[in-house]
Amino acid sequence: MTAANPQFLKFIDDNQDAFIKRLGEAVAIPSVSGDPAHRPDVHRMAEWLSEKLQSLGVKVESRPLGKQMLEGQELDLPPALLGELGNDPNKKTVLIYGHFDVQPASMSDGWLYPPFELTVDPKGTGKLFGRGSSDDKGPILGWVNVIEAHVKLGLEMPVNLKMCFEGMEESGSEGLDELISEEKDKFFKGVDCVCISDNYWLNTSTPCLTYGLRGIAYFKISVSGPARDLHSGVFGATVHEPMTDLVLLMSKLVTPEGQILVPGLMDLVEPLTEEERARYEAINATVKDFDDAVGAAITFSDDKVQTLMGRMRYPSLSLHGIEGAFYGAGCKTVIPAAVHGKFSIRLVPNLTLAGVTKLVCDYVNAEFAKIKTKSKMTVEMVHGGEPWVADPNHYNYRAAHKATEYVYGKAPDYTREGGSIPVTLSFADALGVNVLLLPMGRGDDGAHSTNEKLDTDNFIRGSKLLGTYLYELAASKE
Ligand SMILES: [Zn+2]
């Protein structure tokens, strides 16, 4: 049973070819936000999308976001599109978000087909190859498909829609936070809940709802000593060496079993409830999936739930590199004058950026004080973002759950992602409403990678899912 209008569902099935053709038009615009040469394409993409939406009766405002310096050039940021369809006070108002910019791609990276031509897999798998097919043009066009179905069939939309589509997501969403906070009591006023379709299923067979994202605190430890690089044959055994001090410090951060050694940090982690644990147990995944994903059997635990929780609900500390160190082939006998150790901690609920920064800096300073060295050391947090978690029992999630059960014939996995999608937190914080991540694509879509694809089935059923979700939201009594 579903609250969705059967005519709507049929329209999506009947118009598959036209939808794929439209996705092809979108993929053909190489809207790479990180490349100055493609900046005009990002603007063109905004115009293309704005026209499509307006032709379906959406009121669209193209909001300039100012300028940006990129690779020594001053560039206009692509506008954000603020769209509105319906303002019936008796209906819920849902804000949907997507981004129309993409990651770079070229044949020389190893693409099977030209990345900016949508290619239907000649092997007949239904895979639609092309940059942006899954991240995030497919999901945006999924919404367009839903709107088109209602307009063409003369059906009333079950909810009021507000839309925020941006063109800088792959380049740090520059300008968007300012727009959100400026408009929170204006354009975004009256939004009841948010739906973002810009992540992926955990695997290739089970749809998921994502209700949490880890944050990050990225640190740099700098150790310096001599005024210039030295030769170990000349100065070895005569001076304190920054690299030796740094390696010792970095070894104090995490154990080979992944345990974080910063005192007090693990005590802050939100305790696990039975209800939450049950969600991990229900996830359709195996430890072998992780082995396959990393290409080796190297998980800390042989237990599925522990492994999933490691990625989704616990913090992690990873050592990333040492700037200033000798690397590469050969046997250079340098004593580096200054080295910078880079590491980061993935944050989870109750670990705030400020709290973790203080714990880490205090600890590293205390450990450095124990070393008998004349080197100088500083430690700082260089960039970060807070973690996010939403209430998965909220009506926003229950509507998506029912829609998934109807469209896919199975309950969704409830996942948290190990990485961050900063705009999620921006909306959750600024608007104070529930945010749902409702992905369209599969875990193997290869967003940001070569041969990015979206399965035709995910595009079509995903479009039904987005529309059915709106009907289930409208049917919800809350
Ligand atoms: Zn994306």
Image (cartoon, rainbow, N blue to C red):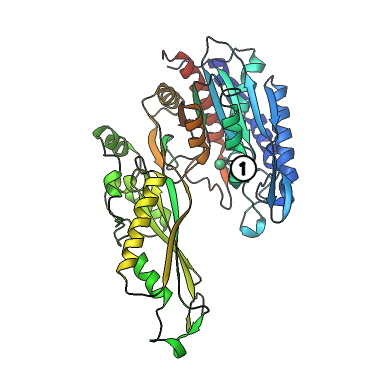
Residue 344, image x, y percentages: 42, 55
In the image, residue 249 lies at what x, y percent? 35, 66
Q: Is residue 31 left or right of residue 233?
A: right
**How many callouts does the rendering have?**
1
Name the residue: 44% across, 24% down: 396
Counting from the top left corner in percent of width and height, residue 125 is at: 55, 42
The percent position of residue 13, horizontal first and vertical second, equals: 58, 25
Name the residue that disc number 1 marks: 174
Is residue 96 in view from this perspective?
yes
Instruction: Categorize mark 1 by other alpha carbons within 10 Å: few (<14), some (14-19), many (20+).
Output: some
Q: Residue at x 69, y 25 (%)?
A: 60
Query: In terms of image quarters, where does ligand 1 lie?
Result: top right
Query: Is residue 295 shown left or right of residue 96?
Result: left
- In this view, the residue farthest toward the left is 274
For residue 253, say whether it is visible. no
Q: Is residue 105 left or right of residue 208?
A: right
Q: Nearer the viewer, residue 386 or 83?
A: 386
Quadrant occupied by the N terminus: top left
Nearest the camera: 165 or 445? 165
- Image: 288 above or below 13: below
Q: Amino acid at mark 1?
A: Glu
Q: Residue at x 32, y 60 (%)?
A: 254
In the rendered view, would you say 434 is above or below 304? above
- Say if disc 1 is inside 8 Å of ligand 1: no
Instruction: Tell me if residue 29 comes above or below residue 375 in the rendering.
Output: above
Q: Secondary structure at mark 1?
A: loop
Tell me: 340 left or right of 285: right
Q: Quadrant of the C terminus?
A: top left
Q: Residue furthest bottom?
A: 234
